[in-house]
Image (tube, rainbow, N blue to C red):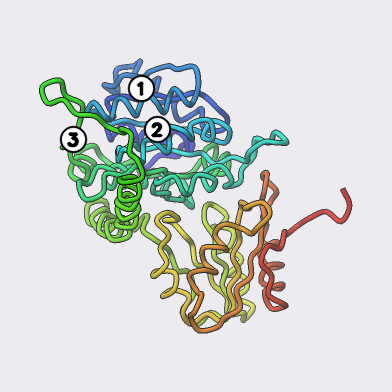
């Protein structure tokens, strides 16, 4: 059913259709509308679930960790400082191979305090062992919720998944979103039936002490499991298209790259602006394109290498920065091309703290890309501050 709704409501409706048995979260801007909506659904009897109110995001993550270990499908959400407060438990969830799904409504990190959008919060936790999926629009944010549960709970994976959507731009933006019928969701997403769970009849423990003689092997196994998602995600997206009739999600999206001489690589809602600018530049005779990263962890190196193989000049637009180094996506992509045929690869950092990224910004990046190669060029800095 198509409806003109807020992004947060669309995500909440998707979560409701997945029927989690336990939901726990703490309100933080701009994530709050998602869990407010779910709490209302539980209160109204539309969702048979236990909504656990807690005193912090750390507690929310702990609640869903305990609940999924006991065999319940779970959901949580957060943003910015709240996600960072969760970080201790975020690492534990991955290390215990717990299939938790979390919606991260991306927002900048303090200090200074800033409630607007960039990707610094989720990108900071890129090494936690969670799969990270980045939505361009509200339809994709909705669809990725279903795919996240399917991936997390697959017996070949058993890894947590973070669905990332840009704060305000998507979470508070209204779009026409196709919310699928319950029977189609049931066809796509089977009931949660974990092989391993806490059970008094069959006692076991999770997350025990591991010394140097075991820790390395356990982390290697988690690393391999996360990398294994690179095979599972295309399989899941193909099944999603078969059932729901639309392409959504995946590893990367190529946009007008067939004969491109320049391309921008980025993630999130900014890719909509880049597509519009690419279309305008194409109309002016410029051979430009976009590679949109949907799956950032695991890093889809082979898909990226294949998509950009014939593009001689590549700009990475990061909405986050590894302070004292470069943009994170730039660093990953630069490493991927190490030892491959030479091409110009430049890194640009833009949009931090909600700074507007306009078609003019994108044109400026393409213009700069024709010049000397750069690694961490901040775009749009004021001349005086």
243 or 357: nearer the eye?
Answer: 357
Quarter-wise, where is residue 149 in the image?
top left
Q: Give the vertical position of 221 relative to 262 (above or below).
A: above
140 or 318: nearer the eye?
Answer: 318
Q: Which of marks 2 and 3 is nearer the N terminus?
A: 2
Quarter-wise, where is residue 51 in the image?
top left
Q: Do the residues labelled 2 and 3 touch (CB within 8 Å)?
A: no
159 or 325: nearer the eye?
Answer: 325
Residue at image point 56% right, 72% down: 263
Secondary structure of residue under mark 3: loop
Q: Earlier in the sequence, mark 1 or mark 2?
A: 2
Depth check, mark 1 against mark 3: the one in front is 3
Q: Earlier in the sequence, mark 1 or mark 3?
A: 1
Say whether residue 312 is left or right of residue 156.
right
Residue 7 visible in the displayed image? yes
Q: Position of residue 72 (x, y in %)?
A: 24, 28
Q: Give the vertical position of 384 relative to 208 (above or below).
A: below
Structural distance between the alpha carbons of marks 1 and 3: 29 Å
Identity of the residue furthest to the left in this view: 201
Q: Are marks 1 and 3 in contact (CB under 8 Å)?
A: no
Secondary structure of residue under mark 1: helix
Q: Name the residue under label 2.
A: 12
Say whether residue 215 is left or right of residue 127.
left
Q: Position of residue 246 (x, y in %)?
A: 32, 56
Q: Position of residue 299 (x, y in %)?
A: 43, 60
Q: Are marks 1 and 2 in contact (CB under 8 Å)?
A: yes
Q: Mark 3 points at which residue?
A: 196
On the rendered image, what quadrant is the N terminus found in? top left
Q: Which mark is residue 41?
A: 1
């Amino acid at each position: 059913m198509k409806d003109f709704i807020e992004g947060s409501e669309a995500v909440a409706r998707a979560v409701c259709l997945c029927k989690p048995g336990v939901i726990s979260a703490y309100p933080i801007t701009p994530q709050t509308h998602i869990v407010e909506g779910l709490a209302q659904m539980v209160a109204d009897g539309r969702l048979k679930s236990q909504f656990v109110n807690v005193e912090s995001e750390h507690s929310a993550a702990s609640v869903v960790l305990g609940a999924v270990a006991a065999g319940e499908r779970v959901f949580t959400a957060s943003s910015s400082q709240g996600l960072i407060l969760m970080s201790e438990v975020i690492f534990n969830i991955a290390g215990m191979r717990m299939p938790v799904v979390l919606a991260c409504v991306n927002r900048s990190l303090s200090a200074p305090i800033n409630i607007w959008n960039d990707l610094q919060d989720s990108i900071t936790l890129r090494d936690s062992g969670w799969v990270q999926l980045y939505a361009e629009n509200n339809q994709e944010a909705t669809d990725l919720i279903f795919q996240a549960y399917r991936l997390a709970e697959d017996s070949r994976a058993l890894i947590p998944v973070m669905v990332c959507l840009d704060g305000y731009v998507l979470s508070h933006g209204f779009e026409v979103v196709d919310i699928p019928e319950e029977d189609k969701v049931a066809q796509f997403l089977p009931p949660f039936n974990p092989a391993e769970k806490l059970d008094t009849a069959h006692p076991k423990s999770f997350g025990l002490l591991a010394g140097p003689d075991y820790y390395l092997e356990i982390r290697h196994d988690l690393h391999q499991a996360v990398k294994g998602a690179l095979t599972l995600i295309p399989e899941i997206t193909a099944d999603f298209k078969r059932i729901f009739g639309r392409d959504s999600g995946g590893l990367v999206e190529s946009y007008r790259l067939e004969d491109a001489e320049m391309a921008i690589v980025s993630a999130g809602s900014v890719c909509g602006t880049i597509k519009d600018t690419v279309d305008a530049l194409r109309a002016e005779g410029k051979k430009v394109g976009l590679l949109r990263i949907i799956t950032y962890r695991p890093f889809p190196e082979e898909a990226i290498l294949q998509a950009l193989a014939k593009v001689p000049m590549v700009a990475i637009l990061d909405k986050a920065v590894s302070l004292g180094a470069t943009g994170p996506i730039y660093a990953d992509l630069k490493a991927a091309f190490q030892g491959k045929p030479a091409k110009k690869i430049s890194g640009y950092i833009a949009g931090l703290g909600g700074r507007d990224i306009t078609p003019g910004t994108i044109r400026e990046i393409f213009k700069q890309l024709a010049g000397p190669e750069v690694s961490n060029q901040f775009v749009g800095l004021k001349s005086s501050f």
